Amino acid sequence: MKKFWTYLLLFFAVLVFATWQYRLLCVLLLIIINKEWVKSLLIMKRWKYSYRLLVWGLALAIFIAIPNYFQRGRTQLLYVDSQGLHTHAPLPIYLVNALLPEEEAVNFAVKASAILPADLLSPIFKNLGNRFIKDLKTDFWKGKAFSFFTPYNRLSMQGSNPGSFAYAQACNEWFGTNYDGIYVTKPSHYDKEKKYPVVFFAHGYLGSWELYQGVFSNLNNCFVVSIGTRDLSGIFSYNDINKIFTTYLPLLKTEGYNLDENRVHLIGLSNGGSASNVALRNFSNRFQTITYLSTSCDVTKQSKAKVLLIGSGKDASAVGLPGVSQRLQRSGTRTALFFDDEDNHYLMVHQRSEIIDFLNREMGLEE
């Protein structure tokens, strides 16, 4: 029976759980269930307290792997109060993050998308649509979906495990709470004496995920700040973009970060393209670049900001970006285009390195 539980726990640790938190927990349970066998191993007999040290070491590792309450590491999740000041993480939200880390939720969603028919999943992800679910299913069976987990590993290597702000947005949407927060990723070799540009990222449907911080942490020599809609929609309003200048930039300066406010950039992903549209229509003189990523652009005007367009031919929301680039150029706006005819809506995950190189170059962030 113990052998059965041992193999079952190893199976769960390796094949089911994506987070180190739950992998380590499975290993700890395995060691406790097989206590006498573990203690009988030659390496464990060398020191009197080897077994205790192993158990306490794993318990400490699990504690470190749990999402941060007191923020540490290069990427941090800052909650913002009604006065625009940094406040503590709400305890209920932190506990949800600790029990079900975002990476585990993504792990479950990816595997459920691969196994379950799209029409069963559509009512759950009602605003995502069958098309995007089918893309994810195809990605899984082609081995591409595993690249969704690389950004989380990147955060762990940076000593960051900030938790998911999407949970707070879900509470706002379902229970009427009013949580506000931003992710802040510092430059990789941060120098307090140096001024850095700021790249603001606007998420798509399903909220502001920790995932994106791992995706964009390879942008060079800049702060990356992920802003959020109140709910999960990713539909940004004029007030949401105005808060960049009235709330978030002042907050970052209050936190002691040295920012170059003449070099502010914006990236809008999927539904977050609404942020790019608002910015291009109303704030184009405040941003150095405005980026559309796997989304559509419905603004054609002369703009001081350079417009970057990133999309793919098998993504209905972005298929028209090459034509948009030409229309913007005729209007007197500088543009740069990254387009792959054969990729789908998850282009940013599939071609992360190539797109980061494109953004570093076009935003002038190269070292």
Image (cartoon, rainbow, N blue to C red):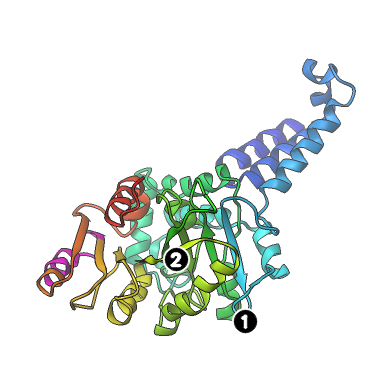
Q: Amino acid at mark 1?
A: Gln
User: How many residues crowd around disc 2 within 10 Å: few (fewer than 14), some, or many (20 or more)?
Assistant: some
Q: Quadrant location of the N terminus?
A: top right
User: How many residues crowd around disc 1 within 10 Å: few (fewer than 14), some, or many (20 or more)?
Assistant: few
Q: Amino acid at mark 2?
A: Leu
Q: Nearer the viewer, residue 350 or 356?
A: 356
Q: Residue at x 33, y 76 (%)?
A: 279
Left or right: 366, with 323 as reference point? right
Residue 180 inside the magenta-drawn segment? no
Left or right: 55, with 199 as reference point? right
- Which segment did they paint magenta? 310-327
Residue 314, given in percent of the width and then of the height, sits at 23, 59
Residue identified by numbered label 2: 121
Q: Residue 71's quadrant in the figure?
A: bottom right
Q: Nearer the viewer, residue 257 or 238?
A: 257
Q: Which SS class for mark 2?
A: helix
Q: Nearer the viewer, residue 197 or 362?
A: 197
Residue identified by numbered label 1: 83
Mark 1 or mark 2, which has the lower sequence index?
1
Q: Quadrant location of the C terminus?
A: top left
Q: Nearer the viewer, residue 317 or 37?
A: 317
**129 w.r.t. 356: above or below:** below
Residue 94, given in percent of the width and then of the height, sits at 68, 64
Cα separation, mark 1 vs mark 2, equals 39 Å
Left or right: 7, with 114 as reference point? right
Q: Residue furthest left?
A: 330
Q: Residue at x 55, y 80 (%)?
A: 173
Q: Residue furthest right?
A: 48
Q: Which SS class for mark 1?
A: loop
Count numbered badges in the picture: 2
